[in-house]
Image (tube, coloured by chain):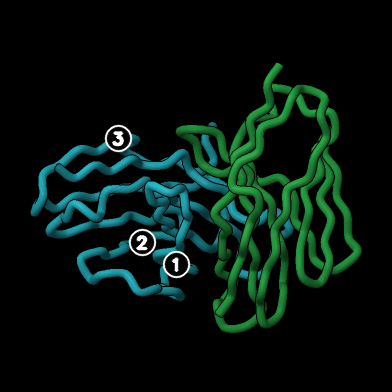
Chain colours: A cyan, B green
Amino acid sequence: DTAVSQTPKYLVTQMGNDKSIKCEQNLGHDTMYWYKQDSKKFLKIMFSYNNKELIINETVPNRFSPKSPDKAHLNLHINSLELGDSAVYFCASSQMPGTGGGGYTFGSGTRLTVV
Amino acid sequence: EDQVTQSPEALRLQEGESSSLNCSYTVSGLRGLFWYRQDPGKGPEFLFTLYSAGEEKEKERLKATLTKKESFLHITAPKPEDSATYLCAVQDGGGSQGNLIFGKGTKLSVKP
């Protein structure tokens, strides 16, 4: 039973399109995150949600909008996709920030390719 | 600004050849330092959390240590299945609200 699952695993789309990536966790964690891993494998935080409230919003273009219908789900919607958005997007979850020795639990990633 | 630097970027070892990976960090107040393993096409997998200088954690052939400025991941007698990218991350007790800040990783290859 997958702890953090995200769909789809692969997403190929044209520039200018709008797409969504879904994430669900069954760990009962309070906080969920979206990370972007670029071509150099560098993981960078995009958003985090704690109990359905946005608590971090790094310098991400407003074309990216996280949506959390409940604390087990955090979806990422991307408008007007650009070539530079091509990357692997990881969803993760944890207990409340700063608690729990297990760090984050990551999903298996969504590889987004914009053509 | 919080920073995490890992070295080397890549490391090639023969099976059984022990070595160490380095993670140096700069944070305003360390809440925790994390090591993850990432296999190709997969998400990072949690290995260890270290909280204070002098702390050590072990798991099979891996041992993580922490000082006030850096952490080491020691790999003893590695096997080919240890090949992966190892990521270090810090959790800042200051203004980043628990956000994990990652280094760029060390790609380890172990040849039989």
Residue under label 3: A10
Q: Amino acid at mark 2?
A: Ser
Depth check: B111 or B57 in front? B111
Residue B110 is drawn in which quadrant?
top right
Which element is circle 3 on?
A: strand
Residue at the far top in the pictured view? B112
From what the image shows, is residue A58 above or below residue B7?
Answer: below
Is there one chain holding both mark 2 and mark 1? Answer: yes
Which element is circle 1 on?
A: strand
Distance between mark 2 and mark 3 Cα atoms: 21 Å
Residue at horizontal 17%, vertical 55%? A82
Q: Where residue A72 appears, x then y in whole percent? A: 46, 54
Chain for mark 1?
Answer: A
Residue under label 2: A68
Q: Where residue A64 appears, x then y in whole percent? A: 25, 64
Q: Amino acid at mark 3?
A: Tyr
Q: Where residue B99 appears, x then y in whole percent? A: 55, 69
Depth check: B7 or A65 in front? B7
Q: Amino acid at mark 1?
A: Tyr
Q: Residues within 10 Å of mark 1 (few under 14, many from 20)?
A: many
Quadrant into which the N terminus of chain B falls: bottom right
Residue under label 1: A49
Distance between mark 2 and mark 1 Cα atoms: 8 Å
From what the image shows, is residue A36 above or below residue B98?
Answer: above
Q: Where residue B112 appears, x then y in whole percent? A: 71, 16
Which element is circle 2 on?
A: strand
Lower position in the chain sequence, tag 3 or tag 1: 3
Residue at horizontal 43%, vertical 56%? A35
Residue B96 is drawn in which quadrant?
bottom right
